[in-house]
Amino acid sequence: MVDFACKEFEIEAVIKCGLNLTKAELQILKYFLQYGQDWLTTETIAEELGLNLSTVQRSVKKLFERKILIRSQNNMDGGGYFFVYKIRSKKDIHELIMEIVNSWVKRVDSELRSWADENQ
């Protein structure tokens, strides 16, 4: 729980908001955290969580683009390939979130400075 002035935030809400995640993306992130460093396919995730495959594919793509997941290409014997994913360390995710939080703090500071300088 994080306490900010007049509001308390569960850490899960900070992660969801900080990374701008949908409910499905947060659910998938938590699933990856549960399995640690296992490589997972989108099909496995969809089956395990009871989510539509296209929802999982979209969510995993976003998590990969945001550098939360690592992706590896597996080539099949008969041609073609598929991707497997695993989560980065909590330390890496912590650093990503802190970059976002620090950016937010700078914006708040700038807005407060502008507010303080009005009509003086």
Image: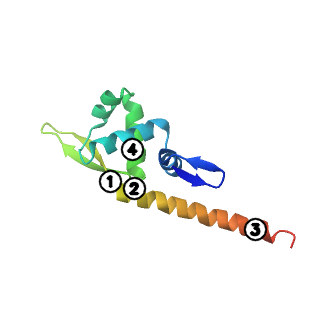
**Camera-side residue of 28 and 64:** 28
> With 98 as the anchor, is 73 left or right in this view?
left
Q: CA distance from mark 2 to mark 4?
A: 16 Å
**Residue visible at 53% across and 59% down?**
101
Q: Earlier in the sequence, mark 1 or mark 4?
A: 4
Q: Earlier in the sequence, mark 3 or mark 2?
A: 2
The residue where tag 4 is placed is 61
Q: Earlier in the sequence, mark 1 or mark 2?
A: 1
Which residue extends farthest left?
77
Where in the figure is residue 45, as x and y percent of width and height? Answer: 31, 34
The residue where tag 3 is placed is 114
Pointer 3 with pointer 2, Cβ within 8 A: no
The residue where tag 2 is placed is 93
Pointer 1 with pointer 2, Cβ within 8 A: yes
Say which of marks 2 and 4 sits in front. Answer: 2
**Residue visible at 71% across and 64% down?**
111
Q: Earlier in the sequence, mark 4 or mark 3?
A: 4
The residue where tag 1 is placed is 88
Kind of residue indicated by mark 2 = Ile
Disc 1 residue crowd, few under 14, some 14–19, many 20+, Cα 10 Å: some
Q: CA distance from mark 3 to mark 1?
A: 38 Å
